[in-house]
Amino acid sequence: MTFVVAPDEPVFVAGHRGLVGSAIVRRLEAGGHRNLLTANRQQVDLRDQAAVNAWMDQHRPRVIYLVAGTVGGILANSTRPAEFLYDNLMIHANVIQAARSAQVEKLLYLGSSCIYPRLADQPITEEALLTGPLEPTNEAYAIAKIAGIKMCDAYRTQYGCNFVSAMPTNLYGPNDNFDLESSHVLPALMRKFDDARRSGADSVTVWGTGTPRREFLHVDDLADACVFLMARYTEPGPINVGFGSDVAIGELAALVRDVVHPEASIEFDTSKPDGMPRKLLDSDRLHQLGWRPSIDLEDGIRSTYEWYLANVTGATS
C-alpha cells in the first residue's frame, strides 16, 4: 500500500541545510509540496531533547525525513570521534523519541554505508550489518548510525511506529562540504584540483594508494529515492540506496581532474590511510521495488563543479 502525503500536509526535513536535506527540499518542492517544515540550530538544537519536544509539539509534522547529523571524511572522523559519536547519537535519539511523542505517522531515517563491516563481502547486502568489525577511521560515526537504525526498529517493535531506515552509498552534489579538513573524497578532490587550477600548480596530491574502490550517488538521485521509500517502503531494518557500480579512487581523481584541471598530474601520498578496501552496496532490494538512479558519475561531477564555481567563495571559472 502506498503511503500518500498530500501537498499541504506538514513535512519536517531535519537537516535541511546539508547536502541531503537541501536535496530533499528541492525534490519535495519540485513535486508540488507546499508545507515544508525546517529549522536551523538557532531555532532548535536537535541535541537538546526538551527543545526538540517543544518544537515538535508546536509544529506537529505528519512525516519526518531525519537527515540531520555531523558528517565528514576520513580526517574529520579520525580526529573528532567524540564529536561524531555524541552529536549523532543525540540528534537521532531526540528526533526519534519526539516523533513518537508527537504521533508522527512516518519517519525516514538516513544512515550511511559505513555501518557495514570493513571486510564485508562485496557488494554489501543489508544482512551484513553487525557481522564483523567496522572500519576504524569512521567507527564512531558508524556506531551512531547503527544505533539510529536499531532505535527505529525498537520503536517499531515496542510502539508500532512506522519508522524506516535507508542506507545511502557515498554522496556528492550541490551544497556538499568542500572544506579540505572535513570533506569527503569527491568534494575534497574537486577543491584540490580547483585550487591547483587557480594557483597554476601542475600536480595534485591524493591521499592513499588510489586503489580502494568506492560507489558514488548524486544527492538528487538519493532525494528521489527517499521520497520513493517514504511512499513505498514499510519494512524494518536498513535498505541500501546505491548506484550499482564503483570506481577506484585513482579513477575518480582522474575523472575530477579531467573536468576541473585537465593539465594537472596526480600524485599519491601512500603514507595516508586508504580506509575500507572496497565499498559497493547491493541495492537489489530497492531496485526490485521499482527505483533506479538516473545521474551518471561524469555528468554528476560536471554539474556539481558548475554549482561549485557559482556558489563557493573564491571559486571562479
Image: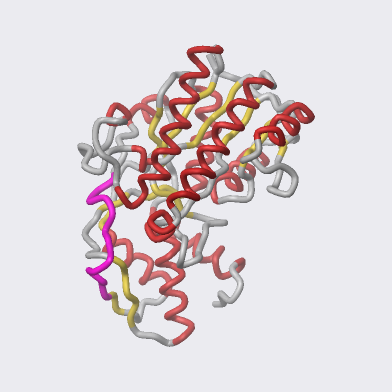
Is 227 or 131 nearer to us in this picture? 131
- Report the residue that reaches farthest toward the bottom: 200
Among the 4 quarters of the image, the one containing residue 25: top right
Is 252 or 176 nearer to us in this picture? 176
316 sits left or right of 121 in the view: right
Asked whether residue 271 is drawn in magenta, I would say: yes
Looking at the image, residue 5 lies above or below residue 115: above
Residue 166 pos. (x, y %): 45, 32
- Taking the spot 59% from the left edge, 44% from the top edge, the residue there is 21
Count of numbered labels shown in the rendering: 0
Residue 230 pos. (x, y %): 55, 27
Residue 149 pos. (x, y %): 45, 29
Looking at the image, residue 97 lies above or below residue 262: above
| Chief SS of the magenta region | loop
Q: Is residue 226 visible?
A: yes
Asked whether residue 149 is drawn in magenta, I would say: no
Chain part drawn in magenta:
267-279
Is 289 or 16 nearer to us in this picture? 16
- Taking the spot 50% from the left edge, 66% from the top edge, the residue there is 179
Residue 118 pos. (x, y %): 25, 43
- Taking the spot 74% from the left edge, 26% from the top edge, the residue there is 60
Task: Specify how the rendered protein is coloured.
Answer: secondary structure
